[in-house]
Amino acid sequence: MEKHLVMYLTRKSIMLLRKYLLVTEFQVSKCRSHIVKIRRDVLYLKRTKYSKYFKCRCSRGREPDGTQLGFGRYGTKSCRDGRLSYRAIEAARRATIGQFHRAMSGQFRNCKIWVRVLADLPITGKPAIVRMGRGKGNPTGWIACVSTGQIPFEMDGVSLSNSRQAARLAVHKPCSSTKFV
């Protein structure tokens, strides 16, 4: 049986979490204040206000939140806008942790990783054998819109060379162009 971690927060604290996008342990949804963490460490929403949304339009004209390092000494910065799936975010996080374990011989206590993107938009899909029409398909996954210059991952507590190697491994998971900061 899966265990669900549900916490209720005030509206102001949800706005602060959304602003800084701290999703290492929590998930903030658009539906009031439901925070859920289920299925190992893969994070996604329990429910949203609407089950289906329009496609996201990544911000092109303005500078998005999260363009400066806020928590760690090192990070990865996206070079172009795009979408990250919740599976790609989790794969990049696991690759980073695995690199830290290998490089530091299991002494992983001082290392910290911050995931600053939030996969909160559902994507829909229809089965291959269904004909055209009859509405939008069912939700199949979650994505996060990432703007140019946004920092999706931050690291601290490791040396520069180890963090560069971990960022190089994590870059290949989301399939988007990023650079080490």
Image (cartoon, rainbow, N blue to C red):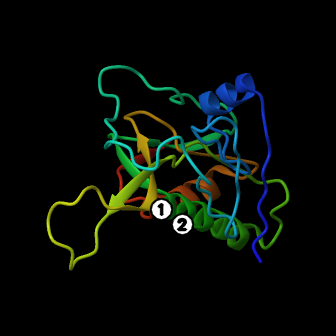
Residue 123 badge? none
**37 or 66: which is nearer to us?**
37
> Given the current orientation, which residue lies at the most extreme front position?
134
- What quarter of the picture does the N terminus occupy? bottom right
Disc 2 crowd, CA 10 A, few/some/many (<14, 14-19, 20+):
some
Distance (Cα) linking label 2 and label 1: 5 Å
The residue depicted at 28 percent of the width and 56 percent of the height is 136
Residue 13 occupies quadrant: top right
Give left or right: position of 68 versus 136: right
> Given the current orientation, which residue lies at the most extreme left position?
132
Q: How many badges with numbers are in the image?
A: 2
The residue depicted at 71 percent of the width and 48 percent of the height is 26
Residue 91 badge? 2
Q: Give amino acid for label 2.
A: Ala
Indicate the position of residue 165 as horizontal and vertical percent values: 55, 61
Give left or right: position of 37 versus 115: right
Indicate the position of residue 121 as horizontal and vertical percent values: 45, 47
Element under disc 2:
helix
Give left or right: position of 6 versus 121: right
Q: Are marks 2 and 1 in contact (CB under 8 Å)?
A: yes
Disc 1 crowd, CA 10 A, few/some/many (<14, 14-19, 20+):
some
The residue depicted at 34 percent of the width and 29 percent of the height is 59
Residue 88 badge? 1
Element under disc 1:
helix
**42 or 96: which is nearer to us?**
42
* Relative vertical location of residue 124 with respect to residue 52 in this rendering, above or below: below
Q: Give amino acid for label 1.
A: Ala
Indicate the position of residue 114 as horizontal and vertical percent values: 66, 46
* Relative vertical location of residue 154 with respect to residue 107 in this rendering, above or below: above
The residue depicted at 72 percent of the width and 70 percent of the height is 101
Indicate the position of residue 68 as horizontal and vertical percent values: 55, 28
Give left or right: position of 82 versus 156: left
